[in-house]
Structure formats: C-alpha cells, structure tokens
Image (cartoon, rainbow, N blue to C red):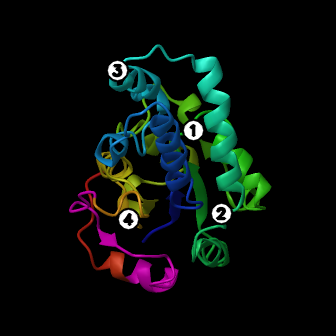
Amino acid sequence: MIEAIVFDFDGLIIDTETPEFDSWKEIFESHGVKLERRTWEYSIGRYSRDFDIYGHLAELSGQAIDREVVRPLMRRRYLERIESNPVLPGVEDYLHSAKDMGMKLAVASSSSPGWAAGHLKGRGLLRFFEFVLDAGDVKNAKPDPELYTMAVGRLGVQPRKALAIEDSANGLTAAKAAGLHCVVVPNPMTKGMDFGAADIRLNSLLDVPLGELLQRLECEAVPTA
C-alpha cells in the first residue's frame, strides 16, 4: 500500500522548464548561435552545476561570455515567463486527495536551494508538504537516488510504499534506483524522453484520479527497495 508521495517540482508542479529553455534560446540567438533542444534535455532534472551553459555558449559562439552580464538578463526573461505560468493541471487535485487519504507528502527537487520552496510558498502550496528537499540537501542530485532515499527516510516509509511523480528521465532514474514506484507526467520539454522504466505514464494528472492511480499501482510488480 502506498503511504507517501514524493513530487518533483520543475516541470511537474509548474512548467519552469519550457520558459528556461526559451529564455536561454533567446540568449544564444543574440550571440548568433543555436541552443539545440537535445543538448538542453541533458540538463533537465539535474542540478545546474552539472551542465555549464555559459561554457557551451562560449564554445559555440567563439566569444568570451561575461556571466555577470548574461545571467541577470536571462533570469529577468525567465522569471517573467514563470510568473504567468499556472500550477499544472491536476496537481492541486492530487494534493487535496492525498491529504484526505492521510498520505505523507514531500518534494524532492534537483533545483538550487530555496527555488522550489519559494515558488511553492508563492503559489500557496507549501502547506501541503512535510518538507522540501533540493540540491542543497544532498551531495548528489538526480539522476543519483540520494534525494529520494533521503525523502523516504525522513518520511519514515519504506521505498516500496512510496510513489514518486516525475517529469524527466533523470528523475525517473533517481526514483527507481531508490526503490520507489514512479509515475511520469512529461511536459513539452520532456515528452520525447525514454520513460520505459516508469510504472505508469500520464499526459496529465487530470487523466486519472489519485485513488484510481493508486489502485493501478497496487496491481503492478512491487519494486525492489
């Protein structure tokens, strides 16, 4: 029986991934080069330090990149886009349903410290979660399983009794390696990734009510903790 749900944040609760790609794409185009989608996909679900976007821009453009100039320009465009993005469909329904069922909830995100918690607070969603973990809490972010292993440990549940909800291949890899069930809900930036290892793939959390989803998972093979 599933006793806890651990949510990813970026691209699952709010689509922050499409705005980030679009903002960086503009920066690259202003330097006369193109940011390939396939290259960007490598970074989705990972901590930002795992992919040197500035170094990649410098390599493609053949120009010295002043991070102190580029970063605030990109961040301004990025944050403007995020502010207009709503909570993704079905997320709040799942949160209310899970609470009604007495389930434990947490967030495990590879984002920088404070990022996920800040946006959850701003959207009035932080109250649903017992805690929010991010890259500042672990030595290795996704696809390493450390975030999920820490999450279920703090929740006090066995991995096989926990469900991860993810949107990226890196997140799926981390969740399964930690022994959790994993449902994936791809977004426009991740829909082409390989999710063959997922227990269930949905187009949206509106596709299946939480109670029905949990019943389906009970019929699946129990993952190894």
Among numbered discs 1 and 4, the one appearing first in the sequence: 1
Give residue 196's mark.
none
Q: Is residue 81 left or right of residue 41?
A: right
**Which residue, given by chain and number where applicable, does mark 2 sit on?**
85
Q: Is residue 219 left or right of residue 161?
A: left
**Which residue, given by chain and number where applicable, does mark 3 sit on?**
59
Q: What range of the chain is rendered magenta? A: 193-215
Give residue 134's mark.
1
Depth check, mark 2 against mark 3: the one in front is: 3
Q: Residue at x 66, y 72 (%)?
A: 99
| Residue 9 visible in the shown view | no
Q: CA distance from mark 1 to mark 4?
A: 19 Å
Depth check, mark 2 against mark 1: the one in front is: 2
Q: What's the residue type where badge 4 is placed?
A: Val
Q: Nearer the viewer, residue 140 or 64?
A: 64
Give residue 184's mark.
4
Depth check, mark 4 against mark 2: the one in front is: 2
Mark 1 lies on a secondary structure that is loop
Quarter in which the N terminus is drawn = bottom left
* Residue 64 drawn at (x, y percent): 47, 13
Please report contact status of discs 2 and 1: CB closer than 8 Å, yes or no: no
Among numbered discs 4 and 3, the one appearing first in the sequence: 3
Q: CA distance from mark 2 to mark 1?
A: 21 Å
Q: CA distance from mark 4 to mark 2?
A: 20 Å
Q: Residue at x 23, y 60 (%)?
A: 197
Q: CA distance from mark 1 to mark 3?
A: 30 Å
